[in-house]
Amino acid sequence: MLFKQDIADKFEKEITQEQLESLSLNFYQGEIIVIDHPDQVKNAVIDLQSEDILGFDTETRPSFRKGEYHPIALIQVASASKVFLFRTNMIGFPEPLRRVLENKRIVKAGIGLDNDLPELKKLHPFNPGGFIDLNKELPPLGFMNTGAKKLTALILGFRLSKTKQTSNWEAISLTTGQLAYAATDAWVCRAIYLRLCGVC
């Protein structure tokens, strides 16, 4: 088992909607770097390759009509000091980033990866390595609730805002709210992983 039961038992295992709503909102307030040009990829990847643990998430423009499909528009990767937002609708899925996501040495903690990874493979084939899906790792430890909102509440003790989830992630420019939302989703995955490892 990836996480130790004695550490997991320090946290509540389920939360009601009422309890969730009583928590204060929080969001990532550190450095956010938007990668929307191929020339920016190399330096971002150099930073990421030096990390042992990353938080991971993706965003896709929502579909409101039957049969409408949109590919992943954003890949969020959180390091110890910043969050990189790779705008795949502008730069594609570059090979240096694929190498990071294939690297088995680097842990990539995410939530609900069963959809993210197949969709990424539609952008370009790759072999995911080092990915940890918190939605799968935590139920065997007794957690009754999964998903980003409830796991963040249970383990980190605050509430996530999801108001930007269905916004247009293919917009020419992302709003401040979108940037904060996207960065937060990757950041909490890393933070949850570390908390369950007993690191913080």
Image (tube, rainbow, N blue to C red):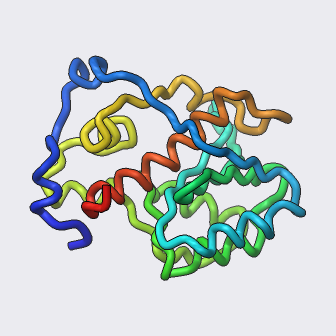
Q: Is residue 88 above or below residue 64?
A: below
Q: Foreground: 62 or 18?
A: 18
At 64% across and 34% down in the image, what residue appears?
63
State the image coordinates of residue 148 (x, y, percent, origin top left): 39, 42
Left/right placement of residue 2 relative to residue 102 reads left
State the image coordinates of residue 101 (x, y, percent, origin top left): 59, 71
Picture quarter containing residue 18? top left
State the image coordinates of residue 188 (x, y, percent, origin top left): 44, 46
Q: Foreground: 146 or 50?
A: 50
Q: Is residue 72 visible?
A: no
Q: Is residue 124 visible?
A: yes
At 78% across and 67% down in the image, what residue appears?
43
Q: Is residue 41 above or below residue 130?
A: above
Q: Quadrant of the C terminus?
A: bottom left
Q: Quadrant of the N terminus?
A: bottom left
State the image coordinates of residue 113 (x, y, percent, origin top left): 46, 58
Q: Is residue 48 above or below residue 135?
A: below
Picture quarter containing residue 179? top right
Q: Is residue 112 above or below residue 63?
A: below
Q: Foreground: 14 or 123?
A: 14
